[in-house]
Amino acid sequence: MKKLLLCVIIVLFCALTACSNFSNQQRSRQINEWLESDRIKVLTTTCFVRDLVENIGGDRVSVIEMIPMTSDPHSYQPTKVDLELLDNASYVIVQGLGLEHKTFNDALLSQTKKPCVLQEYLMENCPGKLIKHEDTGQYDPHIWMDLNLWSECGRGVLQYLETVDPENRDYYKKRAHHYFKSLDSLDMQILEQYAIIPDHLKYLVSAHDAFGYYTKRYFRNGKDRDQHRNISIWGLSPEASLSVKDLDFVLSLIKKYKIKVVFTERNLSFRALQRLKEVEPNIQICLEPLYSDNFSLEVDDVEELLKYNTRVITENIKEKGENS
């Protein structure tokens, strides 16, 4: 067992460190290009929102994220470089819903004249689509995991760009229409992939609670459509401590639903899943880490992230289910 765990750790270490290849030199080049651009400079907090703006804004805007795409947005703190970005930005777009660290958002919004906060748009236009954890009062911020909901965020970005740059309104509308069609098409493809998988296999055990929107959207099946099929060890914050009670609860669900595989995540510690494996040796650990809170050089947009995660999840739950 110890040799097996060591092999798993080595494989995961290689996979996890691969996403750190986004070097300081590359980041510096990205920042310099943005600073030197003569287009409308848009600063977003995260790589996910940056992806939205790039797809809708096209060549009318130059966009950069403040939190580097391989960093954890939950814990990121602003730097002196971020203040320079903020000083040079024409407009700032924030996601909200607790994704960015509170002190980070407070400092950012206090210095921004015309911020766009996507949380406000979603709360006004589609509050029923958001997942709120009643025990903590926290909203789940991982909204890009549901492409139908992500399109709503895109409409918020479109509305903002039309407001601040009305001369290019038709251009933004055309690009947004094309992008929303692409998201809708992928959304349907993912739904079709899960439609042929037996319902009893549609459970996803991960390190932290980043896949609630994903499982609610794509694991649905009639009467229990809203059943929460994402089982996480840490909850919404990957910084949370892990108690014996938490571990026992996850293990009880694994046994109850006869779950055969658990999934690692990029940029997150392997220790919790390692403890699961030690207690429940029959559980399999997927060696391809899922993307949750960041991109990489290989997967650098929301559509690629959803394609990658869907492939990894479907392949593993089907394979492990067939072999059970």
Image (spheres, rainbow, N blue to C red):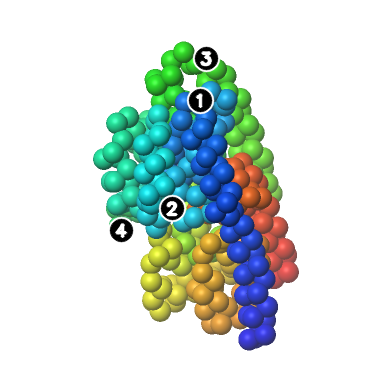
Q: Is residue 180 above or below residue 109?
A: above
Q: Which residue is mark 4?
A: 135
Give the secondary structure at mark 2.
loop
- Give coordinates of residue 43: x percent, y percent: 44, 37
Assess disc 4: are there few (<14), some (14-19) or many (≥20) residues with their C-alpha within 10 Å of its C-alpha.
few
Disc 4 marks which amino acid? Asp
Assess disc 2: are there few (<14), some (14-19) or many (≥20) residues with their C-alpha within 10 Å of its C-alpha.
many
Q: At x 58% / y 55%, what residue is drawn?
A: 23
First in sequence: mark 2 vs mark 1: 1
Q: At x 59% / y 42%, what residue is drawn?
A: 301
* Callout 4 touching callout 1 (CB < 8 Å): no
Q: Which residue is mark 3?
A: 170
Q: Which residue lies most toward the left here?
A: 110
Q: Which residue is mark 1?
A: 39
Disc 1 marks which amino acid? Arg
- The answer to which image quadrant residue 302 occupies is top right
What quarter of the picture does the C terminus occupy? bottom right
Q: Which residue lies most toward the bottom here?
A: 2
Which label lies toward us, 4 or 1?
1
Q: Which residue is mark 2?
A: 73
Which label lies toward us, 3 or 4?
3
